[in-house]
Image (cartoon, rainbow, N blue to C red):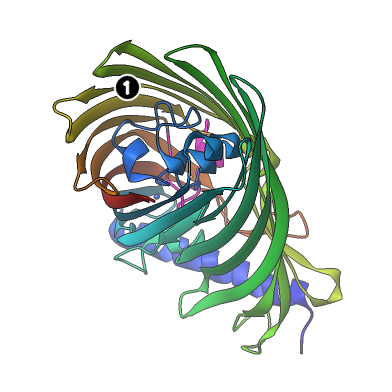
Amino acid sequence: MRTFKSQLGRAVIGVAAVAAWSSAASAGGFDIHEQSTVFLGSASAGSAAGGSLGSMFWNPAATAQFPGLNSESSYTLILPYANVDINSPISGSSGNIGIDAATSASYGAYQLGKDVWVGIALNSPFGLASKPDNVNYPGSYLGVTAKLITMNANPTIAYRIAPGITIGAGVQIEWAQTKLQFRDTPDDIARFGGNDWAFGATAGITLEPRQGTTIGLGYRSQMTHDLEGTFASALLTGGTSVPGVVSITLPDIVTLSARQVITPTTRLLGTIEWTNWSTFKSLPLSLPGGNQLAVPANWHDGWFFSVGGEYDYSPLLTLRSGIAYELSPIQDASERLVQVPDNNRVWLSIGASYKWSDSITLDAGYSHIFVQDGGISQAPPTFDGHATGPTFTGTSQASIDLFSVGVRTKW
């Protein structure tokens, strides 16, 4: 079998030939904010300051706000739309690359003693699923299918060290699975699939400086997954599956939130969140013989700002809404992957909670996310640091609708 470099050379020639023929003939961040129906309705405003048990995702100290035994579950339907138009060196459109998906989050907490609570959170903190309607469009040389699934268990403990001061900490146990595909020749799609376990931590503090004011600060640590699996490509491996490892560092997150009672029936909410996406420099695939394919990213830190409010319409019905502005970690066309055609976003959210009984509350929420149009300027995956094909340029458009329902119980 030929060496990887010689086989890759053939792949590059194939890409260039297709580009020339088609031109002559004919001359779209992936963290999941949807961790609580309650906070989806407020555009995540107040998410680390309590008010709902789902706050423990952002701040484990929020576990201590609820006496006795409590639980919360949320179920969210994600309806994304994204389109990538490539205009050089070949023109073509992806059609919708978004894949409808569902995610859920569950929480439980129990008060062990006067000042001690234990809890557990089950979440999918990061995720991605994309595949173009037109798998033969020019951008398929940059990427066809991308899928990332994470499942995270986060046992926590919270301790009230003094009136108005509570601290919390937890351990993250996370399983991840990925599937990546890109076109390497007109007739072949290279494929990788792998999975891995990783471990991390969470920590937080909740302050109540005066009655009616709650401030929460939470931290989720970064985790590195070395996803071990197999890679197959007609040109690079002769169609044979070989071992491969994709390494990805998922960022740490810091969330600062406030919750302020304005009147007995009205509360003002706010959140600022920082996500360390600058750790995501590339997506490398290590292959036998020390060879490496890589998708460059060079992302920047992400920022999220939201404000919202809650209003008790009656003793049984609470209404909420919020607006958020998100600074994307993708700030340049060279950083925008066709699998993640992200850009700065505006969130508009509404939600409601209905107290079904003394022990059961039902929640609902909806968000529409407006994603700013962006440019694309990407080359196919590099091989040992060298470009393997021409740079494809184009534009992307995207938007997302989120529908969520949830239930909270207390005993």
On the question of residue 251 being in view, the answer is: no
Q: Is residue 249 left or right of residue 312?
A: right
Residue for badge 1: 308
Q: Position of residue 183 (x, y in %)?
A: 50, 70
Up-down relation of residue 252 to residue 307 (above or below)? below
Task: Give me the residue at 29% from left, 65% from top.
Answer: 133
Task: Give me the residue at 21% from left, 42% from top.
Answer: 355
Res 269 quadrant in image = top left
**Predominant SS along the magenta part:** loop
User: From which residue to which does the magenta span run?
Assistant: 330-343
Q: Which quadrant is home to the N terminus?
A: bottom right
Up-down relation of residue 232 to residue 340 (above or below)? below
Task: Give me the residue at 54% from left, 40% from top.
Answer: 63
Tell me if residue 334 is in the magenta stretch: yes
The three-letter code of the residue at mark 1 reads Gly
Q: Is residue 19 left or right of residue 357?
A: right
Q: Position of residue 389 (x, y in %)?
A: 60, 58
The one of 337 and 61 positioned closer to us in this rendering: 61
Res 240 quadrant in image = bottom right
